[in-house]
Image (cartoon, rainbow, N blue to C red):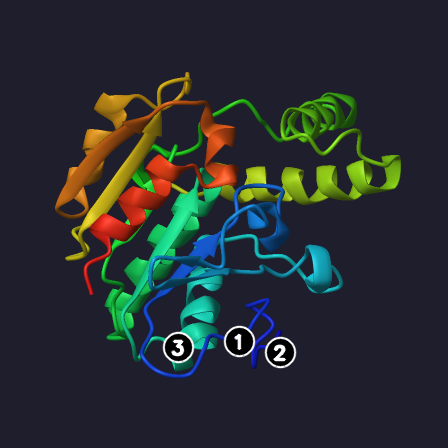
Amino acid sequence: MRQPSTRWLLQEPSSGARPLLFCFPYAGSGASSLRRWPGRIGEIEVHPVQLPGRENRIREEPYRDFETFARDAVRALGPYLDRPYAVIGHCMGALLAHAFTSHAQEVGAPLPERLFVSASLVPARGFYGLYHPWMSDRRIAQELQRVSTELGDGALPEELVSLAARVLRGDVQTCLDHAPPAKWLGVPISAIGWDGDLDVGRDDLSEWRQYGETTEYVLPGDPLSFLAAPSGLRKIVEDDFEC
């Protein structure tokens, strides 16, 4: 594995012009949450993005607003934006992918060929979902253990649960403070939902049309299905990422 030239990536993208897919993590997680994803989808290289404050960047201060994140992420990934690329995110990761795209547009950086968002309301709708900053540590820990069990990873060690709960609580607060007005991005969007998702339905996905030309999809499964990169999701990425 080639060491990346930035802490934001786990692996250096290959030399040449192969298209890249930058994947942003969901709340409370890091780049390893996408370990079930393949390294490539067709000719597209898949690169999970690592945020500060988690995993191998645990000693760094986490972001507490999307604007600062987007500024730093566009700058850090700038050397790789000279080739076709797309961004994808799930839940909070979709908000990160949107913020990245919006900032790239503002500063005149190369824009992604496509913005993929999964299980996410539009940013202007504001905070939603199960988790809240006022949830007890016990409740958050219980939910983290439930998710780990559903993913087949088994029970998490208590010290890991404590660390993950702290990261998740901070991410939730960051999302709570984020509700920017809708604006047109000029980037085509694939808005992906899951038929077992009780928070984001097809009508919610259609609201992404305020941000760019949007195609909506609803795939079988619940939101956690995203983490396994099911074949239907991989097909959407490969078909919609025109480069």
In front here: 18 or 103?
Answer: 18
Is label 2 in a helix, a strand or a loop? Answer: loop
The C terminus appears in which quarter of the rendering? bottom left
- Is residue 25 visible to the viewer in this orientation of the structure? yes
Which residue corresponds to mark 2?
3
Whole-Å distance between the Cαs marked 3 and 2?
Answer: 14 Å
171 or 232, which is in the foreground?
A: 232
Is 112 above or below relative to 95? below
Say whether residue 139 is left or right of residue 237: right
Cβ atoms at labels 1 and 3 below 8 Å apart: no
**What is the CA distance from the residue labelled 1 to the residue labelled 2?**
6 Å
Please report contact status of discs 1 and 2: CB closer than 8 Å, yes or no.
yes
Query: Relative to 184, does residue 4 appear above or below in the rendering?
Result: below
Give 70 or 222, whichever is nearer the viewer.
Answer: 222
For the residue labelled by badge 1, is the local secondary structure a helix, a strand or a loop? Answer: loop
Q: Earlier in the sequence, mark 3 or mark 2?
A: 2
Count of numbered circles in the view: 3
**Residue under pointer 3:** 80
Q: Which residue is mark 1?
A: 12
Q: Which of the two residues, 171 or 159, is positioned nearer the viewer here?
A: 159
* Mark 1 burial class by Cα count in 10 Å: few <14, some 14-19, many 20+: some
Please state which amino acid type lies under the numbered disc 3.
Tyr
At 24% from the left edge and 66% from the top edge, which residue is drawn? 105
Q: Residue at x 46, y 28 (%)?
A: 223
Q: Which of disc 3 and disc 1 is earlier in sequence? A: 1
Q: Is residue 83 above or below residue 28?
A: below
Q: Alpha-carbon neighbours of circle 2 within 10 Å: few (<14), some, or many (≥20)?
A: few
Q: Quadrant of residue 187?
A: bottom left
Q: Nearer the viewer, mark 3 or mark 2?
A: 2
Identified at 24% across, 56% down, the residue is 241
Residue flagged by tag 2: what amino acid is it? Answer: Gln
